[in-house]
Image (cartoon, helix red, strand yellow):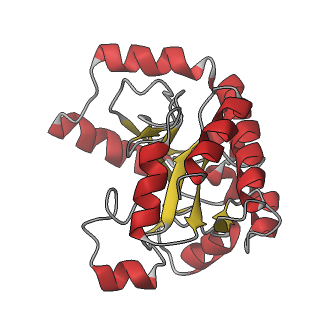
Amino acid sequence: LVWIETPTNPTFKVVDIKAASKITKRNDLILVVDNTFVTPYLQRPLDLGSDLVIYSLTKYMNGHSDVIMGAIVTSNKGLYEQIKFLQNAMGVVPSPFDCYQVTRSLKTLSLRMQKHLTNGLTVAKYLESHPKVLKVLHPGLPSHPQYEITKRQTCGHSGTFSFYLKGGLDESKRFLKALKVFILAESLGGYESLAELPSVMTHASVPPELRETLKITDNLIRLSVGLEDVEDLIADLDQAFAVV
């Protein structure tokens, strides 16, 4: 089994799913793609050769930060039967109300994702031109190393991406504490905009040496750009940069 996340969290590297599929099929392996960050609205791994696609429905698919739930999707009948049996045998099932909430949210997925896409790209372009930003990691920017792959296999990127702030841990903390519209939190994909520092939050349990290798440094900040007015979001970032 080969398991890939594309784009990756929190450095947003993009994997060529078709190329990965050719390798796994040649070696009789199952390819699993975590598509949480972009949803099927923007990327369809099954059409690109993936055998299984997984989602944290908690994130963009639900989009309201009020459900903890996941999903496995496949077009392979054999895999479907195996997974269905295991789910039924082990009792790993969501509650009816959680299912209702996600079903409700899927009705607005296209509207929400389009807003996340445009807001996220606008904020990313703003950050890319800011003198206190070293680098922006957004697959929808031409500066991204896998931009051509992104264009080929997606219809765009969501509102979640990262950037490197000039400075270190102290500067990152000052920046995050100064935010007023962006909420300091680890999740993503909801209607509200969030900001986090992976090195001390989501990826704090990763050994420091490995974090350094993966470039998850103390100045790497991840944003989940929500559905607010983008001018308010940029103004919030602007005033936070002023204290760095």
Q: Position of residue 143 (x, y in %)?
A: 79, 69
26 to 111, vertically: above or below: below
Relative to 121, say whether 68 is above or below: above
Q: Is residue 232 left or right of residue 34?
A: right
Residue at (73, 59) in percent of width and height: 130
Residue 18 visible to the viewer: yes
All told, the count of numbered labels is 0
Instruction: Say which residue appears at 51% left-offset and 37% top-offset.
Output: 182
Quadrant where the N terminus sits is bottom left
Is 188 or 1 nearer to us in this picture?
188
Task: Give the side of residue 154 with respect to residue 209, left or right.
Answer: right
In x, y percent, where is residue 35?
55, 50
Q: Taking 202 as reference, is 134 left or right? A: right
Question: Residue 134, relative to residue 54: is it above or below?
Answer: below
Against 171, residue 112 (above or below) is: above
Between 165 and 223, the one nearer to me in the picture? 165
Q: Residue at x 78, y 60 (%)?
A: 129
- List x then y, in percent, for residue 150: 75, 61
Residue 244 location, x and y as percent?
Answer: 53, 59
Q: Report the residue at 26% width, 30% height from top.
A: 93
Left or right of 201: which side holds 110?
A: right
Q: Residue furthest front?
A: 243
